[in-house]
Amino acid sequence: MIRKLIGSLLLLCLAAAPASADWFEEFKDNASDDELLRFLTAMPKGGDLHNHITGAVHSEWFWELALNAEKDGYRYYTKTKINNCKFASNEYGGNAYLLLFKTIPEYALNMLPECEQAEYQAVNQLEGELKQQWLDSMRLDQSHEGRAEFFEALWPRVGGMLTNPHLVADLLVMNMQAFGEEGLVYLEVQIPVHGFRDSSGERITPEAVADIYRARLRDDDAQATGVEVRFQLAILRFMPQAEDFLRIVYKFVAEQDLFVGVNMVGREDNDKGYPLRFLPTLRELRQSIGDVSLSIHAGEVDEPNAHVRDTLLLGADRIGHGVNLITDPDTMLLMRHGPYLVEINLISNLLLEYVNDYSQHPFPEYLRTDIPVALSTDDRGMWDSTMSDEFFVAVKEFDVTWRELQKLTRNSIAYAFIEDDLKDRLLEQLDTRMARFERSFRRGGLKSAATVEPQYRGFLCRRYAVCAPEQ
Ligand SMILES: [Zn+2]
């Protein structure tokens, strides 16, 4: 009798096992890394909620964009040698004289002393080794490169190209195309509208820049991607005038179509940008302005602190990175089961040294204690990676299940700053697409993804030896 009971209990257990997930566990056990990437590339996805669009530019896209900008009258020059025109030693940062491959527009070149002008070469004249060095200078592809290189060298190098609104609008569409090919349907990007200039160096107003973006989104090639786009404006939090700029961008977002949220960026290890600094200004703004959502970088720092809690107090619905949330148990409890989401950037956190190894990353703890999370790409051009690569890291390092993959993709729409009817529609479509993908994979295996080619990039090649096949 007892044996019979155990027997039926066993049967019951087997029947209750998540049969729908077994196929994915089996696939993971048997798939090569290349097959896993192929699967994850073909898998439908939701949105990218944490994306600095000006950092989402692969080096060869910058090459194409710089040359293509000549149609709008812009010509770019890059520093290829140092003629010792001025004294400099051990310098670093935005205006560093010694920084090679800093690219600037022609009007800025013309403002330099003659000696310095001779240090620059036209980008469209670069070839061979020099062109390769220019391309390599815009990504973190060396083991000695990390946080300092990213903040103090990469951004100053590309900044001169990013004051051309047509170039930024074009790189936005390139991203829509590439993300669309990976199965994304939504991009919520942090995009600048201030500090832009025309090809002669004349200022362009933020309103005119926004018009250029919106017009570009109406073009056929942008529409054909099927990717919805919304914009956030960000402030550099440690600047002396950051409160004034917060007032400006907050009002701008409230007034302008397609702009939905405000973000705060900049190194959190610079104490001058601490979250609660902005509480009085936000309270003042909320006196008279509504409908502005907040997604704010917080917890992207090495030390334990209460930045995530303080950022929720600022009114943020989403937290960018949240790496050190793990050090604040009260706030973790507060965030379980929502309503706030942590935007997880696995590749960024490793390359910028916020974790030394993935075993230190809190992502699985958040995911598996029901703190809402979604995967995002941060500055994927500089990591030389894709959204599928983020999923690859999640599966490879944390053995993410099929149910968890579904949850991650769903969250990336459910927590988007979009109108309710659009959100409902995208979620419904996502559920249908995921169910269809699962059905056809279980029927035909990877053959069902045969038409999808992974976008092989440098990060996965360097770290996991998943590289583009030799031509
Ligand atoms: Zn970021």
Image: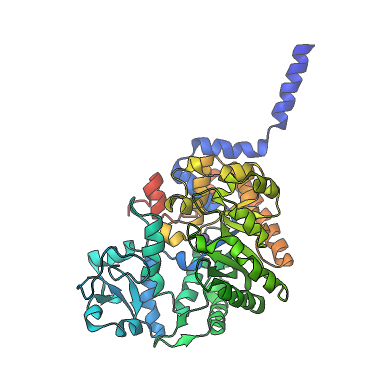
Instruction: Give coordinates of residue 168: x percent, y percent.
Output: 47, 74
Residue placed farthest to the left in the image?
83
Where 468 sits versus 129, above or below?
above
Residue at image position (47%, 50%) is 354
Image position of 69 (left or right of 215):
left
Instruction: Please tell me which residue lies in front, 394 or 154.
Output: 154
Q: Is residue 44 visible?
A: no
Residue at image position (54%, 73%) is 222
Instruction: Give coordinates of residue 348: x percent, y percent.
Output: 47, 54
Residue at image position (40%, 83%) is 71
Image position of 48 (left or right of 198):
right
Quadrant in the picture for the N terminus:
top right
- Numbered label tally: 0
Instruction: Give coordinates of residue 268: x percent, y percent.
Output: 50, 58
Quadrant in the picture for the C terminus:
bottom left
Instruction: Give coordinates of residue 364: x percent, y percent.
Output: 58, 42
Where 352 sits versus 204, above or below?
above
Where 16 sits versus 40, above or below?
above
Residue placed farthest to the right in the image?
1
| Quarter residue 5 falls in | top right
Colour option used? rainbow
Instruction: Please tell me which residue lies in front, 331 or 171.
Output: 331
| Quarter residue 433 falls in | bottom right
